[in-house]
Amino acid sequence: MQTKTSKATSLLRSGNLKEALSIFRTFRIGFTKEERRTLQIASESLAGNASFYQQLGIDTNKEIEKSESILASKYL
């Protein structure tokens, strides 16, 4: 049986950030409130809602980069 964590880390290692973020953003334990928010914004931005966050003044590219570094430091 494959766990959510193992599935998400294998997606991350294969370079599929969008799918990995869709799983990691549901995690409640292991991330701070700010990290969870970054993962959520990055996931939604990659799913096609980047313009919404850009209208709010959030740099979506920066959030995606931050999410990559968060996940790399914890799971790679």
Image (cartoon, rainbow, N blue to C red):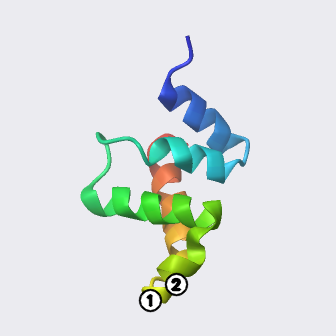
- Look at 27% across and 54% down and name the residue there: 32
> Element at badge 2?
helix
Relative to 4, is 53 above or below? below
> Element at badge 1?
loop
Q: Quadrant of the C terminus?
A: top right
- Look at 41% across and 43% down and name the residue there: 26
Residue 60 coordinates in the image, percent (x, y): 54, 76
Q: Please, what is the three-letter code of the amino acid marked with disc 2?
A: Gln
Residue 66 coordinates in the image, percent (x, y): 49, 67
Q: Please, what is the three-letter code of the amino acid marked with disc 1?
A: Gly
Q: Quadrant of the N terminus?
A: top right
Residue 56 coordinates in the image, percent (x, y): 42, 85
| Residue identifier under label 1 | 57
- Look at 51% across and 78% down and name the residue there: 52
Assess whether mark 2 and mark 1 are in contact (beta carbons under 8 angstroms).
yes
**Along the horizontal axis of the image, is 63 left or right of 18?**
left
**Along the horizontal axis of the image, is 25 left or right of 21?**
left
Q: Of the numbered discs in the image, which one, if any, rests on residue 47?
A: none
